[in-house]
Image: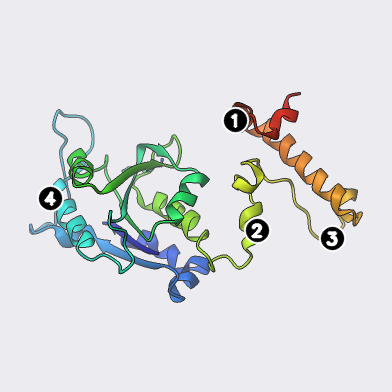
Amino acid sequence: MRVDVVTIFGEYLQPLSLSLIGRAREEGLLDLRVRDLREHTHDRHRTVDDTPYGGGAGMLMRPEPWGEALDAVLADPPGDARPEGPVLLVPSPAGEVFRQATAVELAAEPWLVFACGRYEGIDARVVEHYASRGVRVREVSLGDYVLNGGEVAVLVIVEAVARLLPGVVGNAASVEEESHAAAHSGLLEHPAYTKPATWRGLDVPAVLTSGHHGLVARWRRDEALRRTARRRPDIVAALDAARCDAADLRV
Ligand SMILES: NCc1ccc(-c2ccccc2)nc1
């Protein structure tokens, strides 16, 4: 997978050189390129922002540098790019909510491009322009809170997507079994334990050391259902609406 990130704070993306994602880059599973938006400014102060039309607090990012930067990215496609080009992802508090299903969808793409806004965001014409040119543009939110820019959201999205690529996470089964994994119909993960069997007077649930795999599976399913019902009634409601086997969640 090829990932391009356009930003004025490239150093925010350094964590993507560490650990599993860093190794995926070294092994060629992920080709991540960070590009500096300021290289596409031409004034003495390398200005990327200006005041918002209609007034209001804060500054907005000017469209011209973005147009030049994104044109340069789009002019340099990877060999396996789709005919329809990349998905252009713009982290934004006003975006669609990014979920595990979104990560699964994006992991199937050969090329993702991220536009990291700062200040109060990017002039709306940038999204409008590329969408009108047929680029698949998606504004994505991580939840209902505001950050100072899109870079932290890119760290989250790139990790959530890249770890789904074959070969990135050693144990593919663990990816399947995690919370929100489709294999568990989106339920939260059950509590997990390791040695010692007793720690500060707390014992590991006996069923887990019974050696009875059927009972262990049942206990894990029950705990996942119980935890989901307690912490995420929204997931339960969605499962109910989908009339999955969560019917036995009705208490
Ligand atoms: N929902 C997470 C999120 C994503 C992006 C931004 C953001 C803030 C300022 C400028 C550009 C993007 N804030 C929150």
- Residue 24 or 47: which is nearer the viewer? 24
How many callouts does the rendering have?
Answer: 4
Q: In the image, what residue type sits under mark 3?
A: Pro
Q: Position of residue 123 (x, y in %)?
A: 19, 41
Q: Quadrant of residue 58?
A: top left
Q: Earlier in the sequence, mark 2 or mark 4?
A: 4
Tell me where residue 179 appears, x and y as whole percent: 63, 46
Disc 2 versus disc 4: distance between alpha carbons? 44 Å
Query: Which of label 2 and label 4 is nearer to you?
Result: 2
Q: Residues within 10 Å of mark 1 (few under 14, many from 20)?
A: few
* Marks 2 and 4 in Cβ contact (< 8 Å): no
Q: Amino acid at mark 4?
A: Glu
**Gap between marks 3 and 1, in whole Å?**
40 Å
> Looking at the image, is mark 2 or mark 3 nearer the viewer?
2
Q: Badge 1 is on which residue?
A: 242
Residue 196 tag number: 3
Which of marks 1 and 2 precedes in the sequence? Answer: 2
Kindly identify which numbered label has been placed on residue 205. Answer: none
Q: How far separated are the C-alphas under marks 2 and 1?
A: 25 Å
**Disc 2 designates what residue?**
174
Label 3 residue SS = loop
Q: For mark 4, what is the residue?
A: 64
Residue 204 visible within the image: no
Dots 2 and 3: beta carbons under 8 Å? Answer: no
Q: Is residue 67 left or right of residue 100?
A: left
- Residue 22 placement (x, y as % from top left): 47, 70
Q: Earlier in the sequence, mark 3 or mark 1?
A: 3
| 2 or 3: tag closer to the N-terminus | 2
Mark toward the start of the polypeptide (3 vs 4): 4
Give the residue at the far left of this rendering.
43
